[in-house]
Image (cartoon, grey):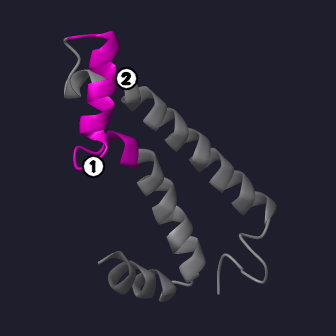
Amino acid sequence: MFAPVFVPMLMTIGISPEMTQLAYRIGDSCTNAISPMSPYIPFIIMLMQKYKKDAGMGTHFSLLVPYAFGFLVAWIIFFVIYTLLGLPIGPGISYFY
C-alpha cells in the first residue's frame, strides 16, 4: 500500500522515490520492536519470564519503548545531517528531482 500511494504523490512535488523509501524505513525500523503484531513477542516473553516470572506484554513494551524512541530520534538526526550536508543516499541517487 505504501509504494503505490506515497511514492507517486511525493514524486509530484519533486522528492525522489529513494528519499521516500528512506523516510519510510526510518519510521518502520524503529517501531518494529514495539509492534504487537510481531511474531517474536511470544518467544521474547518466554525468555523474559525465565528471569521475571510475572513478565508479560506490558513489561516487554515498557522496556522497549525508550529504545524505540531513542533510535527514532537518532535516525532522524542522521537523516537531517545527511540532507543538510548533501551526502548521497547511494551511488548516483539524488534527494530531489
Which image quarter: residue 34?
Answer: top left
Identify the residue shown where x is 59% and y is 47%: 75
In the rendered image, which quarter contains the N terminus? Answer: bottom left
Disc 2 and disc 1: Cα gap in Å? 18 Å
Mark number, residue 39 = 1
In the depicted structure, whether residue 60 falls above or below residue 93:
above
* Residue 4 in view in this figure: yes
For label 2, the crowd category at 10 Å Cα-Cα, with few meaning under 14, some 14 to 19 and many 20 or more, is: few
Mark number, residue 63 = 2
Along the viewing direction, whichever of 60 and 27 lies nearer the viewer: 60
On whether residue 52 falls in the magenta region, the answer is yes
Would you say the magenta stretch is mainly helix, strand or loop? helix
Q: Amino acid at mark 2?
A: Leu
Residue 44: image location, x then y, percent: 33, 32
Q: Amino acid at mark 1?
A: Pro
Instruction: Report whether 58 appears left or right of 31.
Output: left
SS class, disc 1: loop
Identify the residue shown where x is 56% and y is 84%: 14
Q: Which residues are magenta?
A: 32-53
SS class, disc 2: helix
First in residue order: circle 2 vs circle 1: 1
Identify the residue shown where x is 39% and y is 78%: 6
* Residue 15 in view in this figure: no
Along the viewing direction, whichever of 82 and 64 lies nearer the viewer: 64
Labels 2, 1: front one: 1
Instruction: Report whether 77 appears left or right of 44.
Output: right
